[in-house]
Amino acid sequence: MPKESWVALLEDEKLAEVMLERPDHDRIIGDIFLGRVDAVLPGIQAAFVDIGMERAGFLHVSDLIYDEDPEHENGRSDRRNRSRARKYPPIQSHIQKGQVLLVQVTKEAISSKGPRITAQVSLPGRFLVYMPHSSNVGISRRIEDRVQRTKLRRMAKKILPRDSGGIIVRTVSEEVTEKKLEKELKHLREIWAKVLAVAESQEAPALAHRGAQLIGGVMRDLFSDKFDAVRIDSRPIYNEVLEYVKSVDPELSGRVHLHEGEEPLFDKYGIGEEIQRAFERKVTLKSGGHIVIEPTEALVSIDVNTGRFTGKGKKKDPAKTILQTNLGAAREIAKQLRLRDIGGIIVADFIDMESKAHRDKVLHELKTHLGRDRARTKAFEVSSLGLIEMTRQRVRPSLFNSLTSICTSCRGVGRVYTPATVLRRIERSLARVATAREEKKIVVRLHPEVALRVIEEEPGLLRRLRSRTRLDLNLRDDPLIGLDEFRLLSGPSETDVTSKYSPV
């Protein structure tokens, strides 16, 4: 089994989106579970449901089954919008602790939060999304042609048996035939029947249906005649993908290629380097300006700076320079949000613009480029402080969170104490040692850079500390210790007493 699977999407020969799947972190979006309600919380109108994972799933009242069927390609609408649109009956009147429910994962566990789940199950196919608990027929909003929408709606209603659920026709179905729609609906209904049969035979918590894994899901959801080619560097996966494409859209099978060269596929297209750059805080703009991306627990902040860009020509126009920088930043921000898969709340601090026309132009540019993103995004008006607030749909941890962990040296703040600060901390700790009068001999282990600071800038420090504390005191440099760490070792056996005299 491969250690990991990567999918990279290139637009105009540049990396636009990257997805990763590893065996040690199961992809559970779309999986259906037979869950048991652990707790019902009326205060927040939600419940926690045990689905057999490390953390319980979070089920909001708006994700229970109601007679409502928004037109979204994934079969569900934005919960915030629905919550504002209607008032739901109390969750405690619908479910109770210990109750068994069929639920589907809509968002991966992120940070300390468990997975987000819904009782409004949907089964996506290539052309349709089947919703067993619905009754409506919807058309993807990305199909804008009215005549085509009317045609597809009529076709969908014709193939859907009475009281058999609801369906949404997906974007890729613009030129699909009625026969293909009917065939896929039959297949999806058969899958649902199997889900119910598995659920009937299992005890909660249990997996009732595994959703498509990464590569299969991408081919099903994205691959169309808008793609020039799909290149795969694994023969077994190539054969699997080719067989699938031949079954659903044979005309596209010629666009599926096996990469057999000695040069790794990602190296050939410069994808590895692009992924590495996706971890950098600072992103340079073509204009010479730059943006700085800072993820935090609550939101992601993005700061825009002009840098060395001061405009061109003899007569420099500051307002025009700022506008050009902000427009370039708007394009880059939209690109980076998608590439890094950043979700949640994003606040962008653009360079102040006095002209309302300029502010509107930048906002329009941002929204235009956000429109290429598959994830639902929304950008609000420029605030009085010159900020643009955005939200982006978050269904899985970002690329940054998936591939990195918190630094043990800085503990996630991204900064460490300077050598001078470390020395002052050592001084305060030794003062506590002297006051306690329990130790006679102390060795201080510290990073070589901090030791160098003592030699070059504070040569009298050790003598002064010995005099002040009355301790048999020595310093010892240790390259294995963190730059802003130190250890206090007591007595001939050099017992570590750091935590006793230097509380964090």
Image (cartoon, rainbow, N blue to C red):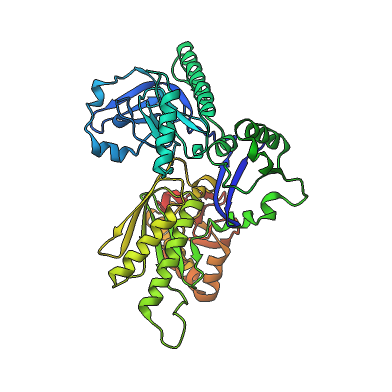
Q: Quadrant of residue 5?
A: top right
Q: Is residue 272 left or right of residue 288?
A: right
Residue plotted at (51% across, 70% down): 286
Pick the front one: 41 or 173: 173
Instruction: Tell me residue 265's x, y (percent).
Output: 69, 49
What residue appears at the point 51 percent right and 30 percent down from the top-left corner? 125
Residue 319 shows in the view: yes
Q: Position of residue 17 (x, y in %)?
A: 54, 50
Q: Nearer the viewer, residue 399 or 405?
A: 399
Residue furthest to the right in view is 262
Residue 440 visible in the displayed image: no
Residue at x 45%, y 61% (from the top left corner): 331
Residue 19 figure quarter = top right
Q: Looking at the rendering, in which quadrant would you find the N terminus?
A: top right
Vertical side of 186 occupied by 342: above or below: below
Left or right, residue 345 beside residue 127:
left
Location of residue 28 with respect to 190 vertically, above or below: below
The residue lying toward the viewer, choosing from 54 and 410, is 54
**Is 179 displayed left or right of 315 in the figure?**
right
In the displayed image of the protein, which residue is found farthest to the bottom? 314
Query: Residue 137, how many percent across, how many down?
Result: 38, 29
Instruction: Tell me residue 445's x, y (percent).
Output: 54, 58
Question: How many marks can you see?
Answer: 0
